[in-house]
Amino acid sequence: MSEARALLLSLVSCLFLWENGITAPTCVKDNDDNTALYLEKLFSLTFFMTDVLATQVQNLHAEFINQYAQDKKCSDRIPEICHTEVLDTPKNRAEAQKTNPEELLKLVYSLLGSNNNTLHHLVNEMSLLQGDTSALLFKARQIKEKFEDLMEGVKIILALVEEKGNIIYVPWSGLASLQSNSEDVRYFAFYNLIRCLLRDARKISIFHEVIKHKMAARNTC
């Protein structure tokens, strides 16, 4: 069992406990240390997952550049706009700290969900690249699993904080470029896809860290 799967099982177990008697007051009293520790653990688990995810996407990005993008000079070209840029997300940590934690949590879920198709096609099409793609495929599959696990974890947290507002999923439309007969178009499409995944993974990690600290401060009387 992967570490992400184990963490997710922990989250599910926590949800079971919550639904069977543990409540989440807006401000945890001094005599409610168990609930405070529970909340801290819950956010720590998902933050750990976001941190691992960002590192794994960074490794995939570096591996792809080393194996393919340097020869194609992809980094010297003007990158395409990431499909998730239409989401109104904070541009940096300072802006994130000014944002309501529930809203940040929904943005994290939107970023995760908006990359579902992207990751599915990344894994499917990567095997068609020239050369030995085994290392890249291994990393891509790990990332796909982390996205899915983290999405489940964030879904649980959204349910716990009773956040039911609309969550936007942005469709990805880059499959034609990944399957292009032009090798130049195809490799540049992979480069942009992975670059955008890295951008989103870093945002997810930063936002979740801010959320965790904001929720901890909120539960301090």
Image (cartoon, rainbow, N blue to C red):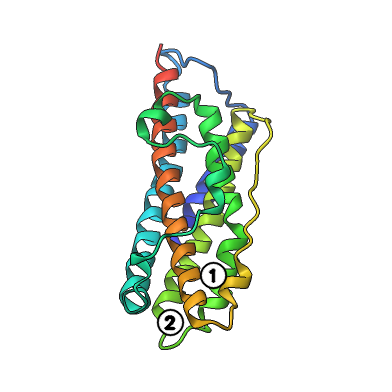
Question: Please, which residue is most extreme toward the bottom here?
Answer: 131
* Residue 189 at x, y percent in the picture: 50, 69
Q: Within 10 angstroms of label 2, few (less than 14), some, or many (20 or more) residues?
A: few
Does residue 127 lie above or below 12 as drawn?
below
Residue type at numbered disc 2 = Ser
Q: Secondary structure at mark 1?
A: helix
Percent x, y for residue 77?
38, 65
Which residue position holds label 2?
Answer: 134
Residue at the spot 38% in from the left edge and 36% down from the top edge: 92
Q: Is residue 28 above or below residue 5?
A: above
Label 1 packing within 10 angstroms: few (<14), some (14-19), many (20+):
many
Q: Which three-letter amino acid code belongs to the residue tagged 1?
A: Leu
* Foreground residue among 85 and 126: 85
Q: Position of residue 172 (x, y in %)?
A: 62, 58
23 to 205, vertically: above or below: above
- Mark nearest the camera among 1 and 2 is 1
**Res 12 seen here:** no
Question: Which residue is located at x 40 percent, y 29 percent?
Answer: 95
Choose between 73 and 99: the one closer to the eye: 73
The residue lying at 52 percent from left, 50 percent from top is 150
What is the spatial separation of the Cα atoms under label 1 and label 2, in whole angstroms?
13 Å
Count of numbered circles in the view: 2
Circle 1 residue: 122
The C terminus: image quadrant: top left
Query: Can see residue 181?
Result: yes
Question: Which image quadrant is residue 165 in?
Answer: top right
Which badge, 1 or 2, comes first in the chain's sequence? 1
Q: Is residue 84 left or right of residue 77?
A: right
Q: Which of the pair 17/205 is nearer the observer?
A: 205
> Is 58 situated left or right of 158 in this image?
left
Q: Quadrant of residue 30?
A: top left
